[in-house]
């Protein structure tokens, strides 16, 4: 469980920093920049709170991963369907699509893992 929490914090931090880099000076609306920051902060908060394993904190951790999955779902498929026409900011659109595909798959696995973690009182 400790590894899962640390991995969550590292990946959420990379997500926040990556979005800042991608969006720096690209003219995208602020709402499309803040969604990744919101998701990342939610995941970091859930991972920190999950140091004490309670049913409520466990549910919050799984829900935070669910929020991340929901956000990357729409982002990935919008990018996939638009191809090179979407605003990839400071990154190559194919690279960004590959990163989004990886994160999408990772979020699916993480939601399932967060739900299935064995509970220890």
Image (tube, rainbow, N blue to C red):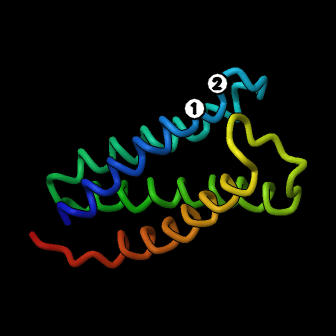
Query: Split into 4 quadrants, where in the image is the N terminus?
Result: bottom left
Residue, disc 1:
21
Nearest to the observer: residue 60 or residue 69: 69
Q: In this view, does 88 lie to the left or right of 6?
A: right
Residue depicted at 19% across the width and 74% down the height: 119
Q: Residues within 10 Å of mark 2 (few under 14, many from 20)?
A: few
Residue 26 spot, x, y in % from top left: 75, 26
Q: Mark 2 points at which residue?
A: 24
Q: What element carries label 1?
A: helix
Q: Which residue is more in the foreground, 85 or 48? A: 85
Q: Residue at x 70, y 25 (%)?
A: 30
Residue count near mark 1 (Cα–Cα under 10 Å), binned few <14, some 14–19, many ≥20: some
Separation (CA) of disc 1 from disc 2: 5 Å
Residue located 23% across and 53% down the image: 50
Cβ atoms at labels 1 and 2 below 8 Å apart: yes
User: Residue 27: x percent and y percent?
Assistant: 78, 23
Q: Position of residue 46 (x, y in %)?
A: 33, 48
Count of picture labels:
2
Residue 67 horizontal side relative to residue 82, left or right: left
Up-down: is 71 above or below 36?
below
């Amino acid at each position: 469980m400790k590894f899962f929490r640390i991995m969550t914090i590292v990946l959420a931090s990379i997500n926040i920093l990556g979005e800042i880099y991608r969006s720096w000076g690209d003219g995208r609306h602020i709402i499309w920049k803040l969604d990744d920051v919101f998701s990342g902060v939610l995941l970091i908060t859930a991972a920190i709170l999950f140091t004490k394993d309670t049913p409520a904190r466990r549910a919050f951790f799984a829900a935070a991963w669910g929020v991340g999955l929901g956000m990357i779902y729409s982002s990935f498929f919008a990018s996939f369907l638009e191809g090179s026409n979407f605003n990839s900011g400071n990154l190559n659109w194919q690279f960004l699509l590959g990163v989004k595909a990886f994160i999408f798959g990772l979020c699916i696995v993480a939601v399932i893992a967060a739900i299935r973690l064995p509970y220890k009182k």
